[in-house]
């Protein structure tokens, strides 16, 4: 796998450093996995693009964030690899949404807190179980999913 070049002259831009580190951590987590050549070629092309990118710090930050998302989406779709707590975070939000929807359907805004709490709890339980299954199957990356 290609190496991501060191970031230079970004000492005063914490957003750029954060975006760079997200990509770096993702690449390191992927390097410990067996990746088919087709997917690996796509990842390497993305890394080459980032290494040769020239633009303002703001554009560079945007490029790192965009490519982080594209690599993560690719490995989720093609290899079924997910970061730690991926399903827990996903199902927790879905559970909260279900709780809100449930209280709206019942037209009882007084129970919205109960619906959100119960939905969140169910989401965490389901998501944690799915994360455990992904870990046992070897489909979990040694990293947490980061967003900006």
Image: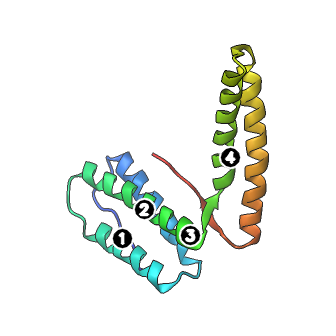
Mark earlier in primary sequence (4, 2): 2
As helix, strand or loop, the secondary structure at mark 3 comes to helix
Picture coordinates of residue 21 (x, y %)?
45, 59
Label 3: how many residues lie within 10 Å, few (<14), some (14-19) or many (20+)? some
Image depth: mark 1 or mark 4 in front: 4
Mark earlier in primary sequence (1, 4): 1
- Residue located at (20% from left, 62% from top): 54
Image depth: mark 2 or mark 3 in front: 2
| 83 over 30 or under it: above or below | above
Q: Which mark is residue 29?
A: 3
Whole-Å distance between the Cαs marked 3 and 1? Answer: 16 Å
Mark 4, residue position = 91
Label 2: how many residues lie within 10 Å, few (<14), some (14-19) or many (20+)? some
Mark 2, residue position = 70
Mark earlier in primary sequence (3, 1): 3
Image depth: mark 3 or mark 1 in front: 1
């Amino acid at each position: 796998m290609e190496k991501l070049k060191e970031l230079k002259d970004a000492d005063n831009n914490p957003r750029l450093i954060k975006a760079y580190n997200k990509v770096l951590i993702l690449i390191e987590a992927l390097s410990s996995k067996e990746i088919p050549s087709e997917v690996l070629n796509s990842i390497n092309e993305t890394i080459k693009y980032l290494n040769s990118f020239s633009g303002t710090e703001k554009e560079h930050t945007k490029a790192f964030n965009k490519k982080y998302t594209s690599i993560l989406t690719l490995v989720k779709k093609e290899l079924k690899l997910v970061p730690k707590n991926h399903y827990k975070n996903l199902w927790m939000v879905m559970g909260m949404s279900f709780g809100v929807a449930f209280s709206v359907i019942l037209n009882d805004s007084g129970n919205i807190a109960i619906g959100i709490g119960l939905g969140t709890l169910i989401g965490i339980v389901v998501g944690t179980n799915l994360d455990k299954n992904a870990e046992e199957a070897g489909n979990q990356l040694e990293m947490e999913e980061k967003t900006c």
